[in-house]
Image (spheres, rainbow, N blue to C red):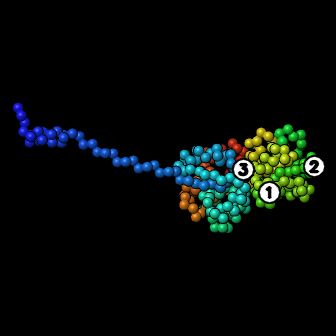
Amino acid sequence: MKLSRRRVAMAAAIGLASLPVVRAAAPASPRQAPVEVVVYAAASLRDVLQQIAPACERALDAHLVFNFGASNDLARQIEAANKADVFLSADETWMDHVARAGLVDAASRRSLLSNRLVVVGASDSAMRVGSASDLNSPAVRRMALANPEAVPAGKYAKAWLEKAGTWAAVADRVVPLPDVRAALAAVESGAAEVGIVYRTDAAISRKVKVLFEVPAAEGPRISYTVAALVGRPNIDAARQFVAWLAGPDAVAAFERSGFIVPARAP
């Protein structure tokens, strides 16, 4: 039996109407890229910050970009170009310098860490150091320090030697270097018989050994201070990063690396 064209068309229309309606899925919105946080940090923090960076990035959904160097150089770079979101200075003085330029978010500023000064020599050195006065020895021809006129580690070392009454006797043997890691490298390479660096720097080297650790009562107060910086597009993320550094994961990593967390100092 032949069906009319009209009946065939009607049957087709009914069949199509009975098919389930499948709607195209709305395109997924693209995942937002992590917020970039640029961190200018003292050279002595390089290893520990790079170690904790992945955990921090996951926790904050951020991408950390580090610039390590001497705190004095970093402070001047911040003042000149304002390219940092966070400043981690190895002393209060250079953070104060940036604050005077109106670039520090005062509410986020905190003293985060402390450290100890140590005298280091080559790993095979036979030298014995029991006090600052032992550095005034004919065996010490060159003493490596971060620049004692500007770099925090060098300023702390000079302050200790001045307090001990030894600075005048050894000042002409000082080899001033750009930062504390350069002072460590000078001892590692044999360019200096001894150097004064942070305890945490000595701990990362197999080429030096600690000859003397400066007791807390004899040395200057060492304060690593951190703050978010104003005039930048991601200040909320910067503040979150500063807060995360004071949290349990970061604190545990700092202590494992030999830093002193002031609230837990003995």
Mark 3: few/some/many CA within 10 Å (<14, 14-19, 20+)? many
Residue 161 in view, yes or no: yes
Disc 1, SS: loop
Q: Position of residue 112 (x, y in %)?
A: 67, 53
Q: What label sits on residue 217 in the rendered view?
A: none
- Taking the image as shown, residue 195 lies to the left or right of residue 241, namely right
Mark 2: few/some/many CA within 10 Å (<14, 14-19, 20+)? few
Relative depth, front residue between 4 and 194: 4
Which residue was labeled with disc 1? 147
- Taking the image as shown, residue 262 lies to the left or right of residue 63, namely right
Residue furthest to the top in view is 1
Which residue was labeled with disc 3? 44
User: The disc labelled 3 sits on which kind of residue?
Assistant: Ser
Which residue was labeled with disc 2? 137
Relative depth, front residue between 25 and 167: 25
Residue 240 in view, yes or no: no
CB-based contact (under 8 Å), mark 2 and mark 3 = no
User: The disc labelled 1 sits on which kind of residue?
Assistant: Asn
Q: Position of residue 48 (x, y in %)?
A: 67, 46
User: The disc labelled 2 sits on which kind of residue?
Assistant: Ser
Mark 1: few/some/many CA within 10 Å (<14, 14-19, 20+)? many
Mark 2 or mark 3: whose residue is earlier in sequence: 3
